[in-house]
Image (tube, rainbow, N blue to C red):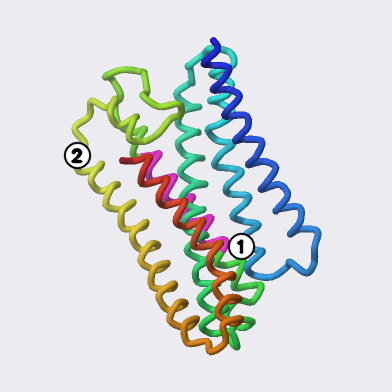
Amino acid sequence: QKLQLLTFSLFLGVYLAALLGNGLIIITIACDHHLHTPMYFFLLNLSLLDLGSISTTVPKAMANSLWDTRNISFSGCAAQVFLFLFFVSAEYSLLTVMAYDRYVAICRPLHYGTLLGSRACVHMAVAAWATGFLSAVLHTANTFSLSLCHSNALDQFFCEVPQILKLSCSDAYSRKAGLLVFAFSLSSGCFVFIVVSYVQIFRAVLRIPSEQGRHKAFSMCLPHLAVVSLFLSTGIFANL
């Protein structure tokens, strides 16, 4: 019981910090008209996705620790898988869009207003959310269409596709492989785009003659690069 209360306290602290941080970002950007720019528009969307992804798993985990229960319904499990994949995939897609925003701001500053007008920003944000929705639908439908018969216990504190596939007794190797190829292609495409964008950005920054100009350009990119690195490294670590 003491360990469960400790787990509850740790999860509650992380969750409240996420709510507070992202909530302040959303309120600040929404209320300050000076922040109604493409960069902050994408940041607002990123905060919304971050709140969604953590709210999908952490409250249920806290309830499990507090009330000493580990049960979740089949439909609840499917909903958790769908929502988690939706928010995480959309977040990764949006980080890719933000890399393009930084590329245009530094490498093509005179065309920034043209390439990243309000309509273009909305279209790119919608595309990121739509990508997350499509990925979540495909993964969820493929996973829960399999016959699950080995057990009803998951070795994870939330419903996750790899753990659910361990319970499958269906011979669906081709479907699993196809889903893996789709996920790898999508994530690799985003990763390559981000890397190429930052190669171009760093080449442009190094050509800036003044040290103050280089520092300002780097300060515009490093926060986004840090978020991308943290997002990918934690995801890779968790999957490994």
Q: Magenta stretch: dominant SS?
A: helix
- Between the C-alphas of marks 1 and 2, the distance is 38 Å
Name the amino acid type tagged 1.
Phe
Residue 80: % across, % down: 49, 33
**Residue holding disc 2:** 173
Q: Residue at the spot x=28%, y=28% of the render?
A: 166
Looking at the image, which residue is at 31% across and 17% down? 151
**What residue do we see at 62% from left, 66% from top?**
122
**Is 153 placed left or right of 95 in the picture?**
left
Q: Is 187 situated left or right of 40 in this image? A: left
**In the image, residue 137 lies in the stretch drawn in magenta:** yes
Identify the mark at residue 60; answer none if there is no mark: none
Q: Is residue 174 magenta?
A: no
**Residue type highlighted by circle 2:** Tyr
In percent of width and height, residue 33 lies at 80, 67
Tell me, for residue 42, which label it has, or none: 1
Compare marks 1 and 2 and give the one earlier in the sequence.
1
Q: Secondary structure at mark 1?
A: helix
Q: Position of residue 31 (x, y in %)?
A: 80, 58
Question: Considering the image in quadrants, where does the C terminus appear?
Answer: top left
Q: Quadrant of the N terminus?
A: top right
Q: Which residues are magenta?
A: 125-141
Whole-percent x, y for residue 229 in the image: 44, 56
Q: Classify mark 1: residues with Cα within 10 Å, few (<14), some (14-19) or many (20+).
A: many
Q: Is residue 194 left or right of residue 13?
A: left
